[in-house]
């Protein structure tokens, strides 16, 4: 189990540096409210996620009284049993002891336990639980009160940028750096599901150049191709919602990957990461020397031709293998030259055959 130590402070996350040494991006499966308030379903997700190959699982810790009120509106009117969003958050709650059991389960199956707190009280609970890392949701980027509370824990912080422009991010990043916080940033678009024109894949490199920290991508597209593209464009962290089935009840179901899709994504992005760690030198093709001798061709005659015939383009064909005649790429050098001897159809053509 990878554990964070407070003295491991650098521009990369401790857990990110471990994965990068293994040539792998750090993959986080986000459960959010897919459990719909059921502790049993939540534990089922832990078991299922542990079999996909990701390194971390992420939850959201909601304590309704500390984070919300009856005045908070629904983002999406989906609930069949909650009159207000406050009531929904109440239904999503687990006790501190239940969260400790959740963390223990994650430890047992080898998953890093990451969580988004939405109140200072939740941070206190998560410290008791011994959370691996904190995720700052897009709606909390400007909540410096919560940010300060999390910074004081000394744990790594992942900041999602879904609703922030650069001016807002500049302020948050400046605050984090002034506190020597160990943080990374995820390009994210707060749209469920995210459409291709909303991905903002270009922002991955812009964030790296602007802030010089580890950068990742938080995906809500429900497509494995998006995550693959993000890793190919330099994302070191990849976060995505997961669900057993996209038809299941919940606000994020249609923005999530299924478990089988996660397995495909893991295999694909690991392959892409390995490829990126092994750049090809296109100036050197020694590896293909033997294959070139098989696949490349020599010049040949495509009809019976008499001695003294002047070679034209229409007389020529190219045949395998290489080195049995004049290289096919040199055909221009023999057009207009005369044959020294009679040549039969399909004979290779060599320099000694020409005047």
Image (cartoon, rainbow, N blue to C red):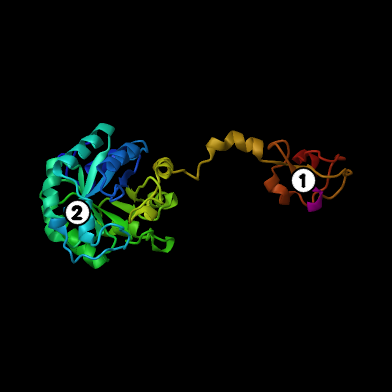
Vertical position of residue 41 compared to residue 33: above or below: above
Q: Is residue 55 visible?
A: no
Judged from this view, the residue extending furthest toward the front is 81
Q: Which residue is mark 2?
A: 90
Cα–Cα gap, marks 2 and 1: 79 Å
Q: Which residue is mark 1?
A: 317
Give the residue at x 21% y 63%.
Answer: 170
Judged from this view, the residue extending furthest toward the top is 108
Which image quarter is the N terminus in?
Answer: top left
On the image, the x and y values in percent for residue 28 come to 31, 45
| Label 1 secondary element | strand
Give the residue at x 83% y 44%.
Answer: 339
Start and end of the magenta stretch? 312-317
Vertical position of residue 87 compared to residue 105: above or below: below
Vertical position of residue 123 compared to residue 4: above or below: below
On the image, the x and y values in percent for residue 16 come to 27, 43
Of residue 155 and residue 114, the one placed in the foreground of this image is 114
Judged from this view, the residue extending furthest toward the right is 306
Magenta run includes residue 314: yes
Give the residue at x 16% y 56%.
Answer: 64
Mark closest to the chain's N terminus, 2 or 1: 2
Magenta run includes residue 342: no
Of residue 338 and residue 260, the one placed in the foreground of this image is 260
The total of numbered circles placed on residues is: 2
Q: Is residue 149 visible?
A: yes
On the image, the x and y values in percent for residue 178 come to 13, 57
Of residue 123 and residue 226, the one placed in the foreground of this image is 123
């Amino acid at each position: 189990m990878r554990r964070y130590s407070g003295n491991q402070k650098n521009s990369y996350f401790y857990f990110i540096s471990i994965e990068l040494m293994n040539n792998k991006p750090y993959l986080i499966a986000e459960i959010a409210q897919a459990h719909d308030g059921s502790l049993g379903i939540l534990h089922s997700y832990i078991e299922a996620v542990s079999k996909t190959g990701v390194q971390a699982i992420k939850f959201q810790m909601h304590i309704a009284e500390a984070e919300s009120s009856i005045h908070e509106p629904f983002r999406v009117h989906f609930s069949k049993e909650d009159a207000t969003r406050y009531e929904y958050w109440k239904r999503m709650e687990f006790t501190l002891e239940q969260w400790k059991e959740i963390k223990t389960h994650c430890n047992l199956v080898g998953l890093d336990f990451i969580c988004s707190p939405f109140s200072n009280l939740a941070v206190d609970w998560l410290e008791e639980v011994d959370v691996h890392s904190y995720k700052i949701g897009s709606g909390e980027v400007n909540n410096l009160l919560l940010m300060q509370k999390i910074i004081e824990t000394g744990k790594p912080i992942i900041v999602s940028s879904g609703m922030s422009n650069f001016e807002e991010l500049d302020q948050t990043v400046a605050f984090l750096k002034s506190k020597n916080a160990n943080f990374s940033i995820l390009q994210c678009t707060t749209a469920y599901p995210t459409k291709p024109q909303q991905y903002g894949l270009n922002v991955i490199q812009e964030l790296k150049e602007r802030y010089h920290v580890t950068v990742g991508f938080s995906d809500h597209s429900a497509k494995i191709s998006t995550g693959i593209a993000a890793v190919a464009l330099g994302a070191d962290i990849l976060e995505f919602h997961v669900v057993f089935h996209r038809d299941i009840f919940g606000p994020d179901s249609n923005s999530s990957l299924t478990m089988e899709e996660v397995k495909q994504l893991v295999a694909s992005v690991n392959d892409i990461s390995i490829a990126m760690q092994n750049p090809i030198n296109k100036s050197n093709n020694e590896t293909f020397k033997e294959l070139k001798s098989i696949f490349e061709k020599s010049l040949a005659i495509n009809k019976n031709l008499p001695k003294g015939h002047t070679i034209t383009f229409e007389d020529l064909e190219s045949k395998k293998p290489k080195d049995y005649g004049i290289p096919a790429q040199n055909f221009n050098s023999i057009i207009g030259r005369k044959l020294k001897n009679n040549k039969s159809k399909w004979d290779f053509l060599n320099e000694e055959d020409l005047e």
